[in-house]
Image (cartoon, helix red, strand yellow):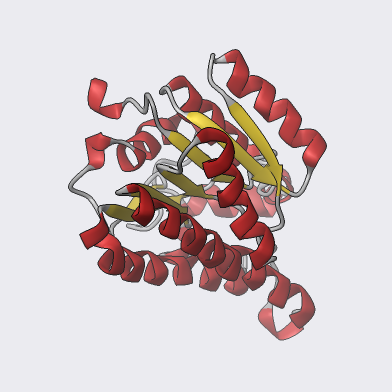
Amino acid sequence: MTSFRLDGRVAVVTGASSGLGAHFAAVLAHAGADVVVAARRHDMLEAVAGTVEAAGRRCLAVPTDVTDPVQCRALVDAAVSELGAVHVLVNNAGTGYGGRSDRDDLTRTSHLFDVNLLGAYQVAAAAGRAMIAGGGGSIVNISSALALATTDVPQAAYSASKAGLLGMTRDLARQWARHGVRVNALAPGFFSSEMTAPLLAHERGAASVHAATPLGRVGRLEELDGPLLLLASDAGSYMTGTTLGVDGGMAMH
C-alpha cells in the first residue's frame, strides 16, 4: 500500500545503535526513507548505517547523547543540513533497570529520567521546530506497555518515565496540530533486545513476562513494523495524540 511508503522523506532515529532503534532504522529505509541514526556508540552506528545504505537509502550517523540539549539541536541541524529536512522522528533512545524503589540508587534514577523523558523532550522540541519550518511531519515517541500496566518485576522509575512520555505526546500533539506535525506514541510490550536480555535470561523474569502477557510470549521485532509505519507515514494521517500498543495484550491484562 503506497500510503505506508516514505519515499522522499528523511527520518531521524535516536537510540539507533542496537535493538529496537537499529531495527526501526532498517524498516524506515526499506519503506523508502533516508535515515539519520543517532546514539552514543559511534562504532555501532556505523554498522547500522551500512544496513540502511544496503537498502539503497542515504544514511547519516550522528553520535548523540540525548541528555545534552546542544547535541540534540546539533542532531536535527545535521539532518537538515546534510539531507534537507526532517519529516519523521522516532524518539527511541532509552535505558532501564528493575529493582525495588525502597532500595533504589537515586543517581541511577535521575540518569534514567534524563535519558527516557528529558532526552526525548529535547529531541522532540528540536525536531518539532524543524518540522514546523518545513510544513509538517510525524513524531513517534517510543513508550512502553509498562506505562499502562505492571509485572511482578518492580521497575517503577522506568514505568514512570514511559508514562511521562504519553503525557508529553498528547500535549505536543495539541500544540503542533495546526502546523501539520502529528505526535503519537508506540507502546511495545516485551521484545528481545539488548535492554530486555537480562530480564528475559532470568527464569523468574521470563516467567513474569509470560504471565503478564495474554499471548504468552515476547514479541518478534517484525511485529512492530506495521505499527511504526502506520504512525510515521501518510497511512496514519488522521492520527495524532494517540498511543498504539503492541504488547500481546499486556495493557489489557
Q: On the picture, is 251 further left or further right than 161?
A: left
Q: Nearer the viewer, residue 76 or 6?
A: 76
Q: Residue at x 40, y 44 (%)?
A: 248
Q: Residue 233 sits in which quadrant?
A: top left
Residue 191 location, x and y as percent? 55, 41
Q: Residue 88 sits in which quadrant?
A: top left
Q: On the picture, is 64 further left or further right than 155?
A: right
Residue 186 location, x and y as percent? 40, 50
Residue 171 location, x and y as percent? 33, 71
Q: Residue at x 29, y 28 (%)?
A: 4
Q: Going by the picture, which residue comes out furthest to the left? A: 238
Q: In this picture, is 101 found above or below 94?
A: below
In the rendered view of the protein, which quadrant contains the N terminus? top left
Q: Nearer the viewer, residue 95 or 128?
A: 128
Residue 236 location, x and y as percent? 24, 41
Q: Residue at x 61, y 45 (%)?
A: 78
Q: Residue at x 25, y 21 (%)?
A: 2
Total numbered badges shown on the rendered structure:
0
Q: Going by the picture, which residue comes out furthest to the right? A: 43
Q: Residue 117 sits in which quadrant?
A: bottom right
Q: In this picture, is 171 found above or below 86?
A: below
Instruction: Tell me if I can see residue 247 in this picture.
Output: yes
Instruction: Tell me if I can see residue 151 in this picture.
Output: no
Q: On the picture, is 176 further left or further right than 116?
A: left
In the rendered view of the protein, which quadrant contains the C terminus? bottom left
